[in-house]
Amino acid sequence: MPPLSGRLALGLCPRRLLSFLPRSDLPLFAFPSARPSALPRPTLRRPLSNVSATTLSLRLCSSARVFWSFSRALTLPYTSTRPRRGLSGLRPCSCGPSASPPHSQLFLELWLGWAPGGGWAMRTALVYHEEMTAARLLWEDPECEIERPERLTAALERLQQGGLEQRCLQLAAREASEAELGLVHSPEYVSLLRGTQALGTEELRALSGQYDAVYFHPSTFHCARLAAGAALQLVDAVLTGAAHNGLALVRPPGHHSQRAAANGFCVFNNVAIAAKHAQQKHGLQRILIVDWDVHHGQGIQYIFEDDPSVLYFSWHRYEHGCFWPYLQESDADAVGLGQGRGFTVNLPWNQVGMGNADYMAAFLHVLLPVAFEFDPELVLVSAGFDSAVGDPEGQMQATPECFAHLTQLLQVLAGGRVCAVLEGGYHLESLSQSVCMVVKALLGDPAPPLSGSMVPRHSALESIQSVRAAQAPHWTSLQQQGPARLLNPSTCSPEGRRPPVSPGGPGFKAAEAQGSAVPRSLLDQLHLYPTPPARTAAALMAQDAALVLPPDVLRPEGSAPQEETQAWARLHEALAQDTAFIALGKVLHLLNGILDGQVSSGIATTPAAAATLEVAIRRGLSHRAQRVLCVAVGQLDRPPDLASDGRNLWLNIRGKEAAALSMFHVSVPLPGTTGGFLSCILALVLPLAYGFQPDLVLVALGPAHGLQDPQAALLAALLRGPAGGRVLVLVEQESTSQLAGVLARVLHGEAPPSLGPFSMASPEDLQALIHLRGQLEAQWKMLQVAAPS
């Protein structure tokens, strides 16, 4: 059976629901493919009366559980007229005065996914245990008081309020065994921590004083074992196929902890233990660890610095060594030891205030090129949110939605196997919002558009330039965009440096007071971009009717009004033909749904891609979209009379030559290798797309587009980000149905297939890319990989 994921919705009132659930035909609509031979009847966890959300569970097998969630929701304004299989006989009903109002229905939602090993599983796992809130500071210590239980409870409450927890596979964390802790930590250190359970307050305080920025509590050992165990559970769930990805919501954090020492609030190194576990239990040979916490995770670096099977990337507030933990090995020139040289990638931030553009530039120009070349089998994220806006530790400006974009970018790696583990984050509102953004991205929801100017700071470009120069000898992908001059920030003049800053130190209260008002307006912006009720729709030709798509990808059978279709068809003779005219009506109907916020993204097949693309551009610009990005692949020319007013950015891949006819009209030949294609996308297409900040992205695969299915899928997946998921892909009818299916799945949030082995770009492709970047860098700052002289 092919992989399935999605939800089924039934409009039922509570009384009808209760009468319906025990029926013997329940398995027919729950499992469209077959009737299970012995399915137990559902049992209520609590009565349905007087509750707005009730969860039922069916135990299907020892490793999988299906959750039925009842919640009030607005009726979807954009729905398919095609009846869902097994649901045709059901209708909403009224049961007297207590029935739901007309604008609202009680929906029965079944979130499903078919696990590779057999059995139904949720897409995203959420691992948590309330007992991790037990440890707290028992004495006065301004340095340590910021690491408090409310960090977990606030994040979990926000997940519940947003309905995100209910959409996840919820796993209760288990304790890591001492043998599992021993994968990273010494037996003596584990024994020392075990002994803290019997210590009094003064003894705990004295022991804490032996370490840097650490406090112990009688529950610390238990909490820390739960935190490590949660990371192990998450990795097991993802690598066994029980979940696609997930988040472990844990404390204490772990990335500073070393083999025999607690450090920086960290007791056991949760992510490092999870990586060792993945290597030893699951046989993984390439693991990527991405540490976006604002502090350098020196503990992880020390553990893997000579191990070429683990690629560790960390950005962190450094300030030329004046920010905690004050280590020379946190600088860009620390690249690993022995066989591990090149597998430690440090990106030091030497100023505060780094924002969305700086974080995105770091991913596009440093992390992702190296990560694609490394080709990981698993991505672990040390997900610290003290790097988000408002946090007094980091004093950075990246908004919560930025972390959704970062997560989406990581999901194109390792087949989407991404496991995020909470590290820092001390501003409760910013932390909670950022956690929600990551979970939404893991669930496949579109990320809200990035706010603010997409122009990297000069200091950020200096850091990017330094790390690229330090890593270029080790990575072919960083050699493909021209030489970079090595800077050594740690030896820069100390003039203008800030005084040393410790976690929770003297400057913390002032920074907290200054930063507390900053995120409110930025955080409130997130509510301006509600998630559309439907994620993806496909308007396909008749010959594609049998194409297998995820169950909740809509197949709207409607069309735009004939008068509207006829008016647009007059632009091109090709659109007057019957099949092209019918396809145009479907495209307009789908595009209107995207522009009106009824559906996030869509794919459509058409026999006249060039003409349909021009109509889509003009329709978008005349209806809600202020800026439209058009990525045209193949033999597709820019309409000659399209206005050059800065509202449309036309990017042609597989153009005749590399040319920037204007800053809004760019053409590049299609590279012939995986390395060349990746450089084109990461170093040209995405920087232009994020710099342009479009309201709508149109991707057209025209005649002779030349893309292989994995390349087209990767392009579509990465272009979900710039416009907040509002993407319409047009595919020339001559392309295979299989391509349309792959594109529909990645637009729906699934990971694209692998591109295959990395191969270096040809000299011709490299020269074309360098030529274009040189022409465009002055206008499009996201293209820059070095600070201007």
Image (cartoon, helix red, strand yellow):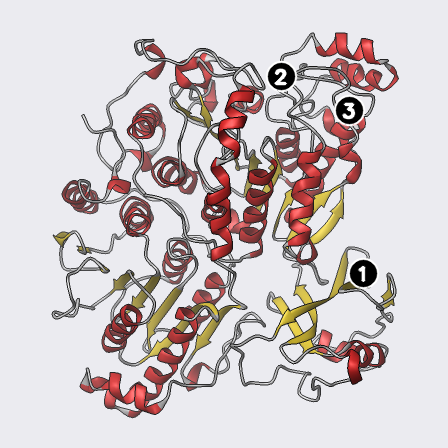
> Label 2 near label 3: C-beta < 8 Å?
no
All told, the count of numbered labels is 3
| Quarter holding residue 40 | bottom right
- The secondary structure type at the circle numbered 2 is loop
Q: Give the residue type at disc 2.
A: Glu
Closer to the camera: disc 2 or disc 1? 2
Which quadrant: the C terminus?
Answer: top left
In whole angstroms, how far apart are the C-alphas of marks 3 and 2?
Answer: 18 Å
The residue under label 3 is 220
Say whether disc 3 or disc 2 marks the residue closer to the N-terminus. Answer: 2
Q: In which quarter of the image is residue 711?
A: bottom left
For the residues labelled 2 and 1, the Cα–Cα distance comes to: 48 Å
The type of residue carrying mark 3 is Thr
Q: Can residue 242 be seen in this view?
A: no
Circle nearer the viewer, 1 or 3: 3
Residue type marked 1: Cys
Disc nearest the viewer among 3 and 2: 2
Residue placed at 47% from the left, 58% from the top?
Answer: 529
Q: For the residue carrying disc 2, how many other residues have a C-alpha within 10 Å: few (<14), some (14-19), or many (20+)?
A: some
The spot of residue 6 in percent (x, y) is: 61, 67
Q: If you read the primary sequence from the N terminus, does the residue marked by circle 1 or circle 3 appear first?
A: 1
Dot 1: few (<14), some (14–19), or many (≥20) neighbours within 10 Å?
A: few
Q: Where is residue 697 in the image (x, y as percent from the top left)?
A: 34, 62
Toward the viewer: 390 or 386? Answer: 390
Taking the image as shown, residue 615 lies to the left or right of residue 166, namely: left
Up the image or down, 29 lies above or below 494; here it is below
Q: State whether residue 665 is above or below residue 92.
A: above
- Residue 778 rendering spot, x and y as whole percentages: 17, 40
Q: Name the residue tied to disc 1.
A: 61
Compared with 229, 13 (above or below) is: below
**Callout 3: 10 Å neighbours few (<14), some, many (20+)?**
many
Answer yes or no: is residue 402 visible.
Answer: yes
